[in-house]
Every structure is written in structure tokens, then in C-alpha cells.
Amino acid sequence: MRAYWSIYHPATWLFPSPHRPHPLDPTGLQRAYQTAKRRAGITKPGGIHALRHAFATHLLEAGVDVHTIQRRLGHQSIQTTTRSWHLTRASLTTPATRLELLDTPSPIRPPA
């Protein structure tokens, strides 16, 4: 993204349409995404929007707070953000707090 930005310096749209002053057409983005998936040998179904859901889920499972996820996805409503999560059974059984993710401390030994 940094290289793209440094070369093109887009003013209005991050990915402008090559033919008019509008954003890149979503159909073209979907086509590019499907081509990249096919070249990578990925057969699992899902479009670009599935990446947003996966992004939100991974952030949540990594312990990122709900409001940060909401801002990163550009949602106005927290309800929209919560619909983006697809929690796995494993994520539901993992420790509930970040403190529980820490290793159990070893006993403090007095200096010799």
C-alpha cells in the first residue's frame, strides 16, 4: 500500500476508476479477487466481503476491543460490527481475558 501510495498519490479515491473520476468498479475488484484466488489455488468459496468478516473475526479473537474493530471497518453502528464476526468453537473456549493468556509466572527465587 505504501508503494502504491508513493507512486500514484490518489487524491479522492484510493483506487480510482481508470475511465472516469469515480472509485474503481466493484465488479472489477471482484474479478481481480477471483483471478488471484484461482492463481493461488484457493477453492474455498467467498468474495471480497468475506475478507472483511475474516478480518473482524481475527481482530476479535486477537483481543482487539469492539470499538477499535468498529472504527477499522468503518461502521457507524456497533450492531453492524457484531454481525461481522464468525467465531469458531475454538475461539469460544479460549481464555476470556488477556491476563489469562499470559504464561503462569515462575516462583521468585531469592538471589544466591
Image: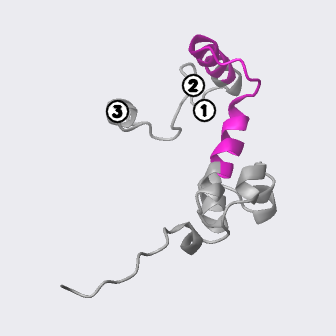
Provide residue 103's location: percent of width, then percent of height: 48, 68
Q: For residue 17, which numbered disc appears in the image? A: 2
Provide residue 26's location: percent of width, then percent of height: 69, 27
**Is 25 above or below relative to 2?**
above
Quarter of the view holding residue 9? top left
**Is 65 above or below relative to 83?**
below
Q: For residue 109, which numbered disc appears in the image? A: none
Q: Nearer the viewer, residue 16 or 28?
A: 28
- Residue bearing the label numbered 3: 3
**Given the current orientation, which residue lies at the most extreme left position?**
112
How did the renderer colour the structure?
one colour
Type of amino acid at the residue the image marks with label 1: Pro
Is 11 on the left-hand or right-hand side of 89?
A: left
Within-10-Å neighbours for mark 2: few <14, some 14–19, many 20+: few
Provide residue 65's location: percent of width, then percent of height: 62, 67
Query: Is residue 37 inside the magenta stretch?
Result: yes
Is 107 on the left-hand or right-hand side of 23?
A: left
The residue located at (42%, 36%) in the rendering is 1
Judging from the image, what secondary structure is the residue with disc 2 in? Answer: loop
Quarter of the view holding residue 68? bottom right
Q: CA distance from mark 3 to mark 1?
A: 19 Å
Are the residues tagged 1 and 2 within 8 Å (C-beta)? yes
First to last magenta residue range: 30-57
- Residue bearing the label numbered 1: 23
Picture quarter with the C terminus: bottom left
The residue located at (65%, 19%) in the rendering is 42
Quarter of the view holding residue 27? top right
Type of amino acid at the residue the image marks with label 2: Ser
